[in-house]
Amino acid sequence: MALLQFISAGLEKVAIPTTVHSDHLIVSKFGAELDLQNALIEHHEVYDFLSSASKKYGIGYWKAGSGIIHIIIFENYAVPGGLIIGTDSHTPNAGGMGMLGIGVGGADAVDAMAGMSWELMCPKITGVRLTGSLRNSRWTSSKDIICKLAGILKVSGGKGKIIEFFGPGVESMGATAMATVCNMSAEIGSTSCIFPYTEAMGRYLASTKRADIAKAANTYSTPLLTADHGSDAYYDEVIEIDLDALEPHINGPFTPDLAHPLSRLSDAVAKNNWPAQLSSSMVGSCTNSSYEDLKKVQHLIKQAKAAGIAKVKVPFLVSPGSEQIRATAEADGIFDDLRDAGATVLSSSCGPCVGQWDRTDVPKGERNSVISSYNRNFAGRHDSNSATHSFVTSPELATVFAYSGDLRFNPATDAVSVSTSPSAGLTESFRFEPPESSELPPAFLPGELRYQAPTLDNRSVQVQIDPGSDRLRLIRPFAPWQDENVHDMPILIKVKGKCTTDHISPAGPWYKYRGHLENISNNMLTVASNAFIPPTDTRCIGHAIDPETRKVDSVPLVAQDLKKRGVKWCIIGDHNYGEGSSREHAALEPRFLGGIVIIARGFARIHETNLKKQGMLPLTFDDPADYDRIAEGDRISLRGVQPGEMKPGKQVTMHVRRRDGSSWETHLNHSFHAGQIQWLRAGSALNHIKNVQRA
Ligand code: F3S
C-alpha cells in the first residue's frame, strides 16, 4: 500500500535509501521449503509487483524467504546512532544496535520516500536502569525485561515516550538480546526504544561484515552513543529493574501486558479457568529468532534427548529470522536436532506470528492455549481463532513447554516424566537445566541470496499490475473536506473495549488483499465488539446496526450500504483505539467506506497519525465518561472543525441528537497541528503533497 501511494504521488525515484521486504505472506503449513514454494506460486503477482515497483523507483527488494524485515535490517542496515522509520510497528528492534527505529504508517513512509520532512511530536524519555546481570540468571532472559516492563507500563504506558535503557545490566546482553527488548517495546505503545552502544554491538557488527562501522562506533561512542543518565533531569521518569531478581515471565492471554512471573502462572491459569493443556508451542518472529535464541533451543533439545525423551509433546514450530540465520543454524546441526525431536522448521518469515498459520488441529471456536516466543497475542492473531489463548515468553520457556505440554509447568521446580519401559509402565523424572548458548556463531553463512539491488536505469521498467487483479489496484485520491459531512452524522459502530488494528483490519487470510483497498475493506471491524448490541447476542462481534434501517449486518456491509446511499458516518471508540500493528489499512478502510470522524476515549500514536494522513478526523472525549452517554441512533454534529475555526489545541464542540429528539453537547479534543489541518482540508496528506507540488 505504501508503494501504491508512492506511485500515486507521481515521482521518479525515492529520495532516501528505501527497502521493501516480503515476509508476511508465507503461510505456515508443511515446513520451510514447501511453504515458500507455495507462496511463490500463490502470491507471484504481488511479488512481481513489489519487484517491478522497487526496480522502477530505486528501491532495494528483499524477496520472500530472505527473512523477517527487522532481522534483515539488523543484519544489514542498523548502525549505532542512526535513525530509521519503517512501516511496521516493531521497527524499534533496531534499538538493539543503538539505532533509533520508529514504526510509522505507510503514508508517513511515503512522505519520507518523497523527500518531504518526517515529523513526530517530541517524545518524553523514560529511562530504564538495569542493575544486576543476565549472566547470573538461570531461566531469565532479555525477553523477561520487556515482559516485566509491559506489566508495569501496560499497553499504552509508553505512548509518546522513548524508552532508553542504561545501567550496568546492559553490558550483560548480546546485541540480538537487546533487540528483543526494543522490538517488544511496541507492545507498550512506545515511540521507540534504545540501548547505548556496547562492545556486544561491535561484536555483532564485525560478525556481519561491518567491522568498519564497529571501529567508527568505538571511536565516537563517548559521548554520542552513550546513555545520558549522568544528569538525573534528563529522563522524565526512571524505572529500575534488577536483573538478578527478575523472574522469567509469561504474558497473556489476549494482551501482552498481562504479565505473570513464572512462579505465579499456575495459580492464574486455575483462577481464570484458562485451558492448561497446550495445543502448540512456537519459537520465532522478529522478536526471538536469532542465532543465540536457536542455540538455546538446541541445548534444551539435546538435554531432553540425553535423558531419553525423543520427541516434544505438542506441535513445536520454529522459524529462523533470516536466510543467514537459517543457513548458519542448518550448518550447525541445530535444525537436524530440532527435526529429530519432532519440531517443524518453518521458513524465514512471519508465519503464525501474523496469522499465516494453516492450522487444522484445532477447530475454530475451540478453546485452547498456545505459547510462543512472539511479541503479540491478541485474540485470533495466530490462527484466526478468537478462542485461542496465546501466551508470549522466551524461546527457552517455549521449548520446555513443548515438552511439558502444560501451562502449569515450571522448569525451575518441576520435572517432566520420561518413560523408561513403556511395556512395564516405568517412568523416571527429568529436570531441565537452564540453557546455554552462544551470542554469535563462529561465522555467519550467507545462505541463498534473495536480494534485488536498486536499479540505476529505470526507464524501461514497467510496474506490473494486472487491471483485472483482485489483489492489486492503483488507488484513487480521497475527496477533499466538506463541511456538511460533519453535520448530523450517524454512528456506524460504538466499539467496546480493546480495539487494536488487528480488530479494525484483521490479518491472516486478509493479507491477500493488502494491495486492493476495496477488497480488503470487507474485513473492517469484523472482530470488534459493538456496544450497541448486547454481549449475549453473538452478533455483538463484528456487526453493526444500520443507523437508518436498523437492520443488523456485518460492519463492512452496513458501511458499504451507507456509502452507496452517500451517507458519511463516524465511529465511537474506547481507550487506546488502534493499538498494535502500524497497519494503515485500519485507517484507509474506514476512509474508503465513507468514514469521516472517529471519536474515542484515546488513540494509539501510529493509528492516530495514520487516520490524519488519510484525511480522517480523530477526536477524543474531553470527559471520557461521555463515551457511556452515546446511544444507538444518536446523530453527531461538530462545531469548531470548519475552515477558519479549527486551531491547534482548540476544543471542538460535539452536539448529540437522540432518536427521541432530545439533545446534549460536550467538548472533544484534537491533536492536529497547523500543517496537519491542511491534510484534513485536502482530503489526505498525499493530496496535500500533490497540491504543494502543483503550486
Ligand atoms: Fe512479522 Fe510478527 Fe514481526 S508479523 S514483523 S514477525 S511481529
Image (spheres, rainbow, N blue to C red):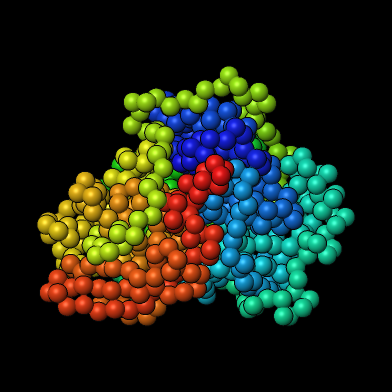
> Where does the C terminus fall, quadrant-wise?
top right
Seen as rendered, the residue at the extreme top is 460
**Residue at 62% from the left image edge and 62% from the top image edge:** 193
In the rendered structure, the answer to whether residue 108 lies left or right of residue 562 reads right
Query: In this rendering, would 301 be left or right of 385?
Result: right
Residue 529 quadrant:
bottom left
Instruction: Kindly indicate the quadrant of the structure image that contains residue 504.
Output: bottom left
Name the residue furthest right: 219
Q: Is residue 597 left or right of residue 420?
A: left
Question: Who's the residue at 73% across and 42% down the image?
Answer: 208
Q: Nearer the viewer, residue 556 or 435?
A: 556
- In the picture, measured across the screen, residue 512 lies left or right of residue 326, that is left
Q: Residue at x 66, y 47 (%)?
A: 74
Q: Is residue 177 above or below residue 441?
A: below
Q: Residue at x 39, y 24 (%)?
A: 466
Q: Is residue 568 above or below residue 451?
A: below
The x, y position of residue 130, in whole percent, is 68, 72
| Number of marks drawn | 0
The vertical placement of 338 against 464, above or below, is: below
| Front one among 449 and 514 | 514
Q: Residue 685 versus residue 429: which sits nearer the camera?
A: 685
Position above or below: 48 against 296: above
